[in-house]
Image (cartoon, rainbow, N blue to C red):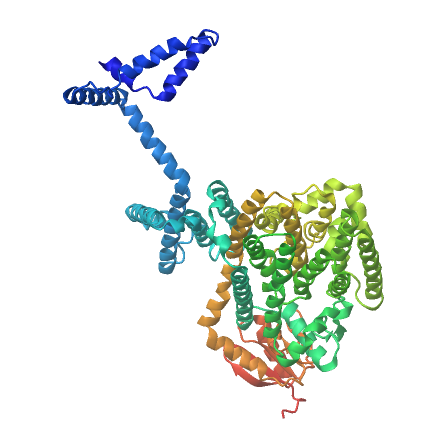
Amino acid sequence: MSEKINDSDKTYSEAEEEKDSARSINGGEVPDEAVTEETDDAAAGSPTDNTVTDSETENTASEKAETAEAKEADNIPTKTFKDSVNDVTRLFVSFISENNVVARLIGLFMLFSSAVFITNYNQESRLRFFDLHNGDVWKDYCNSVSIGKMAAFIIIGFAAVSLIKKFVPKVGKFGFDEFLLVAGCLSFGVCAVWRNDSNPLNGVFSFGIVLVVLVLLHWFLDTERCILIRRIPNIAFIAILIICAAGVGGYVAWTTICKHRIFHTAVFDLGIFTQMYHSIITHFTQVTTCERGYDLSHFAVHFSPIYYVLAPVYFLFPSPETLLTCQAVLAVSGFIPLYLITRRYGFSNVLSFLFTLVYIFSVSVMSPCYYEFHENAFLPPLLMWFFYAIEKENKILMYVFMVLVLMVKEDAALYVMCIGLYLLFSGKNRKHGAIIFCATAAVFVNVLALMSKYGEGAMTNRTFGNLMRNYDSGFGEVIKTAITNPMYFINQCFLTGDEDKFYEKIVFFTVMLLPLLFTPFITKKKSRLFLVVPFIVMNLASGYPYASKFDYQYVFGTATCLIYAALINVADMDKKAIKEIVPLMTVASVIMFAANDTNKLYYADVYKDYKDNNDRKDAFCEAIPEDASLLATPFLIPHCANRDKLYVLDEGSAPNPDTTDFVIFEDGTDEWKQNKRALLESEGYTIYNEAEGLIVIYVSPDYKIK
């Protein structure tokens, strides 16, 4: 019966296939009668026969259904435990691949660690990450961490994100897991180095934190999942950049002003330039007296006509705080041309935004602002605009900014010459590259000749004395040493003369290049290496100890060249590499900025705690008439430098006879200060104003008080 049912299930097409099969077996010569007979047999078994009764039809249908169910039951495989495990594993793998679960877990763990740090720090600031190797502090920190709370936080956070992604599918396009990973790593990194002391050993700790964060992001960050962020309009990114630049610039300006207000700025160099700007707005000269102890134009020391650019601002607001604010604004303003350059290289809105943040949070661009005030702060914006003009191929703009860069300082010629060589050998613009190099070399030689004849000459022996056999020789002696003894030259690039601080240049090298992931050197286009030559020559090779410190003015220009070199080298990479590298550079820059500049909040804290005393001292300084000559101690000079005659009083000069109208110094028990009091009184000076234990002012008997 079952055979008939099976046979009766043959369709017309199956019957035709059997015909074709039979023909193929017999060489295609199967008699039609045989085929017809077989087809008829199949048709004969069909339940459509009119002679079949209703009961037979029902029985046939019932048997047919039973047979089908039996076949179905036979086909269902019996699941084993191993099969069940495999099913669960496949489901788990599918869940992980769709949700980037590891990134979510790491992000939640990092966020919890950051929350614990913030809680501990608010209670006791000694429980900072970088202090945890000191004594038993790390044990106290461990005791403050609740494993139960950590587990609850991660489980609840994980479940919440899973539910949101399940019931709000659009969130998946946001890259929620990636956002948690970046937010967690960034907050962890910033907390770990928050208000870190600026010393080389803690710098090494910062490197470790940055490397751990970068490795985690490299392994688990999938930028392709972040679809929604790419839909944010460009105007929003630009607005955020402006806010970040204003925030960083404002922070640096405020903390440097606080440093000044607590009397942590000195004659070298804020006092010098405050008096110089007084000279500019009153006599249109750069004459100072506190720099060398006699009337001296600053042109005799450095060729820096660029100072006159800020004269109108200082005329309106004649204060050292004006210079500190302008310096921060100048340094951070280089983000504008850099952003425009990224757009010319075809970076997307997101990548342009992230790379510009690398500049805004660059330690080597912002940290030098904390060392008083210097003309070098003009270099970041001017050099970056120079690079923009080169990329835009705007010849007029290019030569305008070339001249402006040369006006910053005599050694700025090195940057311009290297840029000219880069243009010449890269083929980008050979003609103008040659013109820029030759013209700059001629200017450099003539400026040095004028400074040697009318001023104090270039400070080559101070900067490169470690590479000069004869201190009276010029820069050519440095080049000769590098050629004849390259091993010694390399040694000087990475080691200092002080055996106890041999690691300082290595730390400096890492601070400058780690936020850029060392990309300025990652290129096969040899002409681009000219862009890193200023860094090697002016910072690494120099024996002047301050030249290889990232918080001094000597890195303003070299850092700008490194950032531009990093940009053009990254732009040559494939799109996938760019999407991975640029976010990592941004995170590294933010963490390194936190490691080296958040500790400057110390100045704001001290000013807040001792505001009354510091404001009182400042009022004493301002009370001295501006037309009077003044002798003052180094840390008081910046507060009373708006005058023509100003001289430095220290322990060495204290015994000298006094000729100035006023003398001001901090009141104290130091022997030399007590002796100075006695000397002044013996010369007929009388106390003009005094705050016991704080400050004292003497006035000459020859000065007529108005």
Seen as rendered, the residue at the extreme top is: 26
Q: Where on the picture, by quarter, is residue 45?
A: top left
Residue 57 in picture, x, y percent from top left:
18, 21
- Counting from the top left corner in percent of width and height, residue 216 is at 47, 43
Q: Residue at x 58, y 64 (%)?
A: 370
Quarter of the image holding residue 688? bottom right
Quarter in which the N terminus is drawn: top left
Q: Position of residue 397 (x, y in %)?
A: 74, 63
Say which residue appears at 69% left-offset and 43% top-offset.
Answer: 491
> Which quadrant: the C terminus?
bottom right
Of 513 and 465, nearer the camera is 513
Q: Residue at 65% x, 68% y: name it.
A: 269
Residue 175 in view? no
Residue 306 visible in the shown view: yes
Tell which of 55 and 174 is nearer to you: 55
The answer to whether residue 540 is left or right of residue 428 is: left
Specify the farthest residue to the bottom: 706
